[in-house]
Amino acid sequence: MQIFREIEPLKAFLKDQKGSMRSVGFVPTMGALHAGHLSIVRASQAENDLTVCSIYVNPTQFNNPDDLRKYPRAESADIAMLESVGCDVIFIPDNAQMYEDDPGVTLGFGELEKIMEGKFRPGHFSGVALVVGKLFHIVHPNRAYFGQKDWQQFAILSRFVKELKFDIALKWVPTVREHDGLAMSSRNARLNEEERARASSLYRALRKAEEMLKQGSTVSHVQTEIHAGLEERQITMEYLELVDSVNLNFLKNVKTSDNPMLCIAAYVGEVRLIDNLFIDNEN
Ligand code: AMP
């Protein structure tokens, strides 16, 4: 496994590898890796000759300085985990590598970023696309891999790649969960024991909302009920939305789309967690 901390040596290495006709899969992360990240690495390994994983806590996607400061960092454990699954290349740049100057560029995504994460985290998707665009130019992957958990991010990056004509196929990998249903997240490390026990309520809320919608409840009734249920567990729901997973349009009910998805964001203590669920509307 090769570890690079600087852009130019990484580019030279990858240029050389591509000379021998190797396909490159890319997995961008912010580190504090868990089994969810590793399943993305495996998806890349299954389809590419060479897999590059980046670890970079990107400051421009944090609208809350406290969240950035408290974001878990675990570089040596991350390297050991990537080594254990046979990842080929790790890229661990610092801020000076990624942002030579203060970023003077912002990116907009219209309606796609006015809702859900975009509404509650202004500027977040501009920062995400900015860093992913930079990383794409550095790595030049054939395919890039993302998690279902950050679905709005995947939808926005798909738009970004299409609009800017990056010659890169974006792929998503299903959410990996803890035994009680909690979506794995680097942020879970910030939950204390008691918060961790309550955090699985998010997934249970999604399941309950799915059930209610399938039985004909309106979205607003479901939102009110779930909000109240979570409140009882001292969990503050920021949003619960039913959207079309392709264009992120809000849906009135599960029947009005072939791809309905429920998305939720909530605070457990000071930790903000997100999750989502594809709704099967077959019956
Ligand atoms: P992060 O390091 O949190 O920025 O995440 C890096 C990538 O891993 C993103 O594409 C996430 O969507 C993905 N990811 C995060 N958590 C999970 C999970 N539990 N299962 C699958 N993928 C995940």
Image: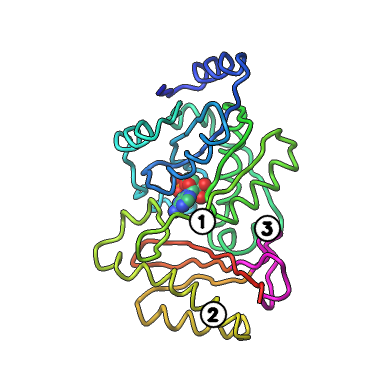
Query: Is 140 rendered above or below residue 282?
Result: above
Inspect the image, locate mark 3, and give the three-letter code of the amino acid beneath it: Leu
Helix, strand or loop under label 1 = helix
The label shown at residue 112 is 3
In x, y percent, where is residue 34? 37, 47
Q: CA distance from mark 2 to mark 3?
A: 27 Å
Q: Quadrant of the C terminus?
A: bottom right
Q: Residue at x 57, y 13 (%)?
A: 16
Inspect the image, locate mark 1, and give the three-letter code of the amino acid beneath it: Lys
In x, y percent, where is residue 94? 43, 30
In x, y percent, where is residue 138? 58, 26
The label shown at residue 149 is 1
Asked whether residue 225 appears in the rendered view, the answer is yes
* Side (left or right) of 42 relative to 259: left
Q: Is mark 1 within 8 Å of ligand 1?
A: yes
Helix, strand or loop under label 3 = helix
Helix, strand or loop under label 2 = helix
